[in-house]
Amino acid sequence: MPRANLISGPLVRGAVVLKVAPSILSADFSRLGGEVEAVIQGGADWIHIDVMDGQFVPNLTMGLPVVKSLRKVTNRPFDVHLMVMDPERYLQMFRDAGGDRLTVHAEATKHLHRCIQQTRALGAAASVALNPSSPLSLIEHVVSDLDQITIMTVNPGFGGQEFIASVVPKIKQARDLIEANGKGRPIEVLIDGGINAETARVVEKAGATVVVAGNAVFSQPDYGRVISAIKGQQRRIDAPVR
């Protein structure tokens, strides 16, 4: 399948529909391929894949075989979130497996700039994630090399956690940092954790362009209805179900 474009066009605040990347960590693993197809039919823009090593976070999740298998199902962008120590060891492997956007944690590597350059050299979009308590100063000097900033609004490691509202000001600060230091690059601001239709409006107002939604989507019978609500497309929500 042809791969989707990795980089979006120029961002015009107030004119961009919020993108939704359902996290398959909350999906039914017994029919994962079908779940991915279902959320895409429901309007998902990207697929978010959480990779955890049991060291950086206290949990183990999906690895290379899952990404490779799901790559056969769709050409939608895969946002692979590497919650692992020393992520530079895995960038090539997850890119080869089908990752389009590779996210590493600033807290998990001693060589953040090298990770970013390696990711871009592989032809993937480079993203850096920050835990709720981590300051934006960790990425201040690499912003102009990024394609995405991922801000965690839960502590990473488990799905279904409650949204940490105190992180919201950091989203606005991230947008300001991009405008000041991003050199005009179309850098996405992705928010991961506790997202539903209500919190999506909060983070969108603060400057988010993409949200990850796991339990909010997969816990409901109508994925399309939930995704539309998260995007704020009320006309679609209010239309009669056919």
Image (tube, rainbow, N blue to C red):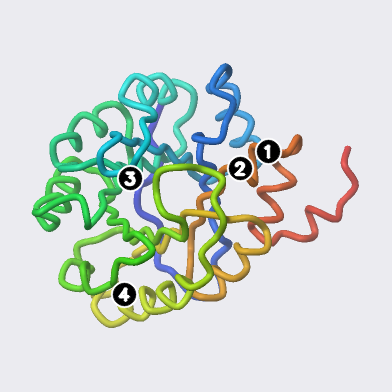
Q: Nearer the viewer, residue 216 or 48?
A: 216
Q: Nearer the viewer, mark 4 or mark 2?
A: 2
Q: Which residue is mark 4?
A: 178
Are circles 2 and 1 on residues that touch, CB within 8 Å?
Answer: yes
Say which label, 3 or 4, has the lower sequence index. 3
Mark 3 to mark 2 CA distance (whole Å): 22 Å
Q: Which residue is mark 1?
A: 219
Q: Residue shown at 48%/63% (left/top)?
A: 209
Label 3 Cα neighbours within 10 Å, binned few <14 / some 14-19 / many ≥20: many
Say which label, 1 or 4, has the lower sequence index. 4
Q: Which residue is mark 2?
A: 215
Mark 2 to mark 1 CA distance (whole Å): 5 Å
Q: Which residue is mark 3?
A: 101
Are circles 3 and 1 on residues that touch, CB within 8 Å?
Answer: no
Say which label, 4 or 2, has the lower sequence index. 4
Q: Nearer the viewer, mark 1 or mark 4?
A: 1
Amino acid carrying label 3: it is Arg
Q: How many marks?
A: 4
Mark 1 to mark 4 CA distance (whole Å): 34 Å
Q: Nearer the viewer, mark 3 or mark 2?
A: 2
Query: Residue 236 location, x and y as percent?
Result: 78, 53
Amino acid carrying label 1: it is Ser
Amino acid carrying label 4: it is Ile
Where is 212 relative to 131, above or below?
Answer: above
Say which label, 3 or 1, has the lower sequence index. 3
Amino acid carrying label 2: it is Asn
Label 2 Cα neighbours within 10 Å, binned few <14 / some 14-19 / many ≥20: many
Mark 3 to mark 4 CA distance (whole Å): 18 Å
